[in-house]
Amino acid sequence: MDNDKLVKLRPFVRNFLKKASSMFEMYVCTMGTQCYATAAVKVLDSNSKYFNSRIIAQEDFKVKDRKNLDLVLSQERGTVILDDTESVWSDHTKNLKVVENMTTLGTKK
């Protein structure tokens, strides 16, 4: 990644990815650029075991500031979405599990 980027992995993320990969086909879907997403995935999945080339970035979205499942090759009813921003998934709220943003993770509210 660029020298000005820091990637902080969530606690137990590698165990989660290992277990989740046995149950799901996993994608990275980000409002970041393709370049950023590819670099972040290299940190998260350096051996390409979990995501391979399944990266969807801002250049791929048809509607700005909105994520959707159009580019995910599975049925919506069998899809689980983990994201820290609920508003970008307005078309798929039934599939969404909101996770705490890493900037606030572990801080008192």
Image (cartoon, helix red, strand yellow):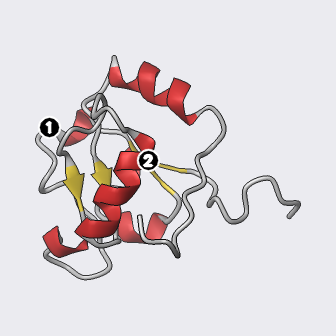
In three-dimensional space, the C-alpha distance between marks 2 and 1, rounded to whole angstroms, equals: 26 Å
The residue nearer to you, when weighing 8 against 18, is 8
Number of numbered discs overlaid on the protein picture: 2
Q: Which residue lies furthest to the right in this view?
A: 108
Query: Would you say the residues marked 2 and 1 are in contact, meaning their CB atoms lie under 8 Å apart?
Result: no
Q: What residue type is labelled 2?
A: Val
Q: In which quarter of the image is the C terminus?
A: bottom right
Residue at coordinates 62% horizontally, 61% vertically from top-left? Answer: 101
Where residue 79 appears, as percent x and y from the top left, is 29, 38
The residue nearer to you, when weighing 21 against 90, is 21
Q: Residue furthest bottom?
A: 64
Query: Which label sits in the foreground, 2 or 1?
Result: 2
Q: How crowded is mark 1: few (under 14 residues within 10 Å), some or many (20 or more)?
A: few
Residue at coordinates 21% horizontally, 42% vertically from top-left? Answer: 76
Residue at coordinates 38% horizontally, 70% vertically from top-left? Answer: 88
The residue beneath circle 1 is 74
Q: In which quarter of the image is the N terminus?
A: bottom left
Where residue 65 appears, as percent x and y from the top left, is 32, 79
Residue at coordinates 61% horizontally, 44% vertically from top-left? Answer: 10
Q: What element carries label 1?
A: loop
Where residue 94 appears, as percent x and y from the top left, is 38, 48
Placement of 46 over or under 28, stated as above or below: above
Q: What residue type is labelled 1?
A: Ser
Residue 43 - label: 2
Q: Is mark 2 on a helix, strand or loop?
A: helix
